[in-house]
Each structure stands twice: as structure tokens, then as C-alpha cells.
Image (cartoon, rainbow, N blue to C red):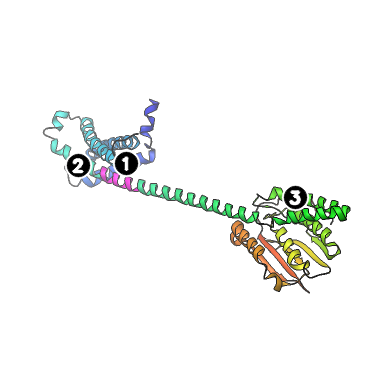
Amino acid sequence: MNRFAPLFEGLTLKRLLAVTLLCVFVASVSVRFFVNTWLDLLVSALCVGYTCMLLFTVATNLPQRRMPPWVAQVVSIILGSFLGTVLAGLVKGRDIGMMLSERFFGVLITMSLGIGFGCWTVWIYYNREREARQAAELARAQAERAQLEKNVLEARLALMQAQVEPHFLFNTLANVQHLVETDPASASGMLESLIQYLRAALPQMREDATTVGREVDMARAFLDIHRIRMGSRLEYVLEVPDAVRGRPFPPMMLISLVENAIKHGVDPCCECGTVTIRAAEEGGRLRVSVADTGEGISVKQGTGVGLSNIRERLKTLYGAGARLVIEENAPRGVVAAIEVDLPAQPPVASPPAAAA
């Protein structure tokens, strides 16, 4: 018996109540046009309505149909109207022979009413089912489009993250090779800083987010490498409170700002320059800035490839929830800041910063 249970799925109390109310309505309207009593018409309407509902449900749930669903449903209404009319006559004490002879006209009228209201119900059901199917197809298409857009954005993000100064590693190794011959102690220090940098950088290359603390630790190792190369010409200051070190932050962006500050700010112009990294929460936003005392904003405007890369990555990850701000640094130099809307979730735990 259980194997036939799926054929009757949909015989809910709500549908039974709806058919009952429809039968009451039909009986109330029809009583004005026939000599039958309201109760007599109600019995006929209920027998036809319930029979049609039962056969309609079975027709709707039939598997492996050889005809369109609406055809099977219309056939079920016609058959249900006939069987329901016969059932109504039997309930009223009439035999089948009488119904097919002297009361045949009444049988036709009852069947016609059943078929008419039944086909009207099929039309409503078919249109609602078609709208539901179209809505489901639209939702599926939108979901596939959203997934495709997500895959495209992820691919673009991965490409942009792969463009973060890959030649830095080779330049550093070349410097280490040179220092091995001229200053072994400095070579050892640079190699140690490079190891620290790689330990911080490699796990984050494929991530969409890390923390301020991890990015600052990576920037410190990066600055240590360049301080060995530049000697007294480079100083750096870290002003990052422990409270913001656990805040989520996009990966490999702070290091791009730091490299930009050295490459286009301090290195080309100054006997001694300073790079300052600050992080703070301001007005519901996380602000992480890199300030240098180098050439100034006029020179930086000609080196916008890295900055446009950052802007594009921020747009990909956060939309309007993040931005890159470039400002002048008094008395000279540039301040580049990344501002990100603070998330609702609590910050990720991160160890306190070590002294520089």
C-alpha cells in the first residue's frame, strides 16, 4: 500500500476545505435554478467535488505520463464528474438504471457543472504551477549567474593577488648572495627577516581575508629586509594597538602600500626617511595607513599600477564597504590609508605585537 501513497500526496486539509467551500457556493447558486432542495444539491456537489479532487490528485502525481499533465487532469475531472454524479445518485437512493434513463438529463446537468467548475479549477492550478515553475527556473538561473559572477570575482582576485611584486623575492635573494661575500652578519639578518616574511606571507596568498596583526607582522619583516639593504636611510614606526590586531583585513594590501612607500617615496630621495604604519578604529571603520617622508604626492601619481590594483581588489572584496585614500603627509611625503567597514562579528584572536 505504501507504494501507492505518493499518488495521493496533496490531499491536504486545506484543499479539502477549499473544495467543500466551493461545493457550498455551487449549491447555493444552483438552488435558484432547479426544483431540488439546497441539501440535495449540496450532496451532489460534495460527491462530485470530492471524487474529482481525488482523481485530480492521482492524475497530477502519476509518474511517467504519456500525455501532458493538464490533459490527464482534465480527463480526471470528466471521469470524476461522472463517477461523482453516479455516487450522488446512489447516496440519494436512486439506482443506476433510473439515472441513465428517466433522470439522465439531471445527470448531464450535474456532470456539466462538475466539469465546468473542475476545468476552471484545472486552469487556475495549471497557471499557478506554471508561474511557480517559471519562478523556480528564474531563481535557479539567478543562482547560477551569482555563482558564475562569484567564480569570476574569485579568479580576478586570485590574479590580482598573484601580481603583488613577485620580483621582491628574487631581489632579496640577490642581496643576500651579495652580503654573504661582503657582510655575512647582515646576510644572516636579512635571510632571517626573509624567512619571517615568507612564513607570514605564504599562508595568506590564497585567502580572502586575514587580520591586521598578521599583515603588520609581515610588513615588519619586509621593512627589516629593506632596512638591512638601506642601512640608516630607512627607519620605521609601528603604531598598532592590540585591540585592532585581531580585526579582519584583506591580505597582501598593507605590504603593497609599504613597498610603494619605500620604492617611490624614501628610496629615491632621502638620506633618511621614515615609514609609519598606523591602525585605528574611527567612526565605525577600520583605518590602516602607511605614511612616508619621501618624495611626495606628485611623484606617487605616476606610479598608480599598484594603487589601482588595491582599489580593484577592495571593490571586488567589499564593494562600497572599503576604499583607498591617498593624502599628503606634512611636512612631506604621502599617507596611503585603507578604510574598511567594521564587521558585526567579533574580531579574530591575534597575538600581541612584539617590540620593533
Q: Is residue 116 left or right of residue 354?
A: left
**Quadrant of the image occupied by residue 85:** top left
The kind of residue tagged 1 is: Val
SS for tag 1? helix
Looking at the rendered image, the quarter that the N terminus falls into is: top left
The kind of residue tagged 3 is: Leu
Looking at the image, which residue sits at the far front? 181
Q: CA distance from mark 3 to mark 1?
A: 72 Å
Label the magenta part by its dominant secondary structure.
helix
Looking at the rendered image, the quarter that the C terminus falls into is: bottom right
Label 2 vs label 3, nearer the camera: 3
Q: Is residue 127 left or right of residue 141?
A: left
Which labelled disc corresponds to residue 19? Answer: 1
Which labelled disc corresponds to residue 198? Answer: 3
Above or below: residue 90 compared with residue 175: above
Of callouts 3 and 1, which one flags the residue occurring earlier in the amino acid sequence? 1
What residue sits 77% from the left and 53% below the top? 173
Q: Is residue 167 visible?
A: yes
Above or below: residue 15 compared with residue 194: above
